[in-house]
Amino acid sequence: MQLMRLACLLLVAGCAAQTRPPQSAGGKPAEVVTIPGDPYPSTYRPYPGVATVIQNAIVYDGTGRKFAPGAVRLENGLVAEVGASVTVPAGATVIDARGKYVTPGIIDIHSHLGDYPSPQVEALSDGNEATSPSRPEVWAEHSVWPQDAGFSRALAGGITALHILPGSANLFGGRGTTLKPVYGRSVQDMKFPGAPYSLKMACGENPKRVYGSKNQMPQTRMGNIAYARQVWSDASNYRRKWDDYARRAKAGTARPSDAPRRELANDTLMGVLNGDILVQNHCYRADEMTNMIGMSREFGYKITAFHHAVESYKVADLLKAEGICSAMWADWYGFKMESYDGIRENIPLVDRAGACAIVHSDDANGIQRLNQEAAKAMAAGNRMGLGITPEHAWTWLSRNPARGLAIDKRTGSLETGKAADVVLWNAEPFSVYARPEKVWIDGAVMYDWADARRRPTADFELGQQGAGDPK
């Protein structure tokens, strides 16, 4: 939908303007060249669900509230009611969750599942188009193998949505896409309907190492910025050409042959400049984040989130002022120089500053235990006296990543009218002993620890030892 809007803005200065299309000399509407807004649309269809009431549970609703006891009613694929008690419709499935916990589904804003699927062999390694420092024309979804067994493992860990990004070898790595962990014949069957695309950018050591080792630019951090600025400058020029064509098309003075030549790389960058594609920016150091913010101001785009942001705590006030989220690990740092100055209190300090704090995985195994990663960060914050409650910490796992993907009006918290993306835990979800018993996506049970028929198995696993076992 965002890209459809982009096409309208580009070509006829707004969909409303199409009520008076350009006229040819013969009085017929003139042909107008358009950029396809969504050439690979979602074909996801929710599985059928039934009206369900989960009651007598402890509920973290994802907005920072706790209900103990609490209840949730799911109906027609949506959260219908949340509170200490809820209405029980006739015929509804009723689950007595005494001693158990209910939360929104976890959303991982940084994953490479499908692009680096299991089994991890070179033939299936499709996450980095490391053939140029700038590859915004590639789309992560076109590398996704829908039969990656990692999707069902993520689901079993309570994941109900995840954002697949290209790797970080490039300054501009390509487009990211948001999926649901459901198996389909194509990646389109998994795409979160209407979720905007992102552009993966990277700063720091990765681009300069990958291309510097090839004796080409960038070899330094100043090379990173210089290269990226030129790319943005070229993209701005491309945008001006399309804006000019759109104005003339609207006035009826442009011929189809006047349309600029399509450049797929610049299509993506123009989408960012027009505010329709989000920027997910791999960046570790605080000083480099400020450089990237400066570049975004120079060319007029917005950074949605910094990823792997181990030094966000140094600039948390700036990130709050800029409205930029930070996607972070709990205690994964020190493995290279740019990650050296991480601290375990990073996530809680960003949160305390009022900025948008997110726990992410960037890992096929870590995505299965993001609840435990958040628990570690919460504990670190509380050791320094921040007094973080579990119900607040859950915002790092659902509401804030939904915000970082611009899907927060539809999912990420247990609020009336939002998608019934829900997890029932057998224990306090920040305990190392907790595991999901059931996971609902759009109101349908997609994982049930107690029911083998509700434990998805990839085609690749069929006939293999352990296929269908509890994950």
Image: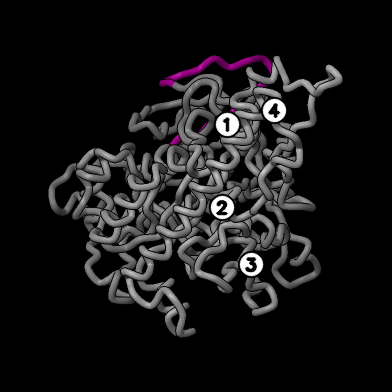
Q: What residue is disc 2 on?
A: 176
**Location of mark 3 (residue):** 117
Q: Do the residues under discs 1 and 2 have CB atoms within 8 angstroms?
A: no
Q: Secondary structure at mark 4?
A: loop
Question: Where is 44 relative to 330, above or below?
Answer: above
Q: Quadrant of residue 417?
A: top right
Residue found 41% across the figure and 47% down from its top = 429
Q: Where is mark 4, residue-wise?
A: 253
Lower sequence index among marks 3 and 2: 3
Contact between marks 1 and 3 (CB within 8 A): the answer is: no
Q: Callout 1, which amino acid? A: Ala
Give the mark nearer the N terminus: 2 vs 4.
2
Where's the N terminus, which quadrant? top right
User: Seen in the image, is 49 located left or right of residue 210?
Assistant: right
**Where in the figure is residue 440, as x and y percent of width and height?**
60, 38
Image quadrant where one finds the C terminus: bottom right
> From the viewer's perspective, is residue 208 above or below residue 324?
below
**Marks 4/3: CA–CA distance:** 50 Å
Q: Amino acid at mark 4?
A: Thr
Callout in the foreground (3, 2): 2
Q: Secondary structure at mark 2?
A: strand
x 55%, y 71%: residue: 132
**Residue 93 can be seen, yes or no:** no
Bounds of the magenta span? 83-100
* Residue 458 in sight from this viewpoint: yes
Amino acid carrying label 2: it is Gly
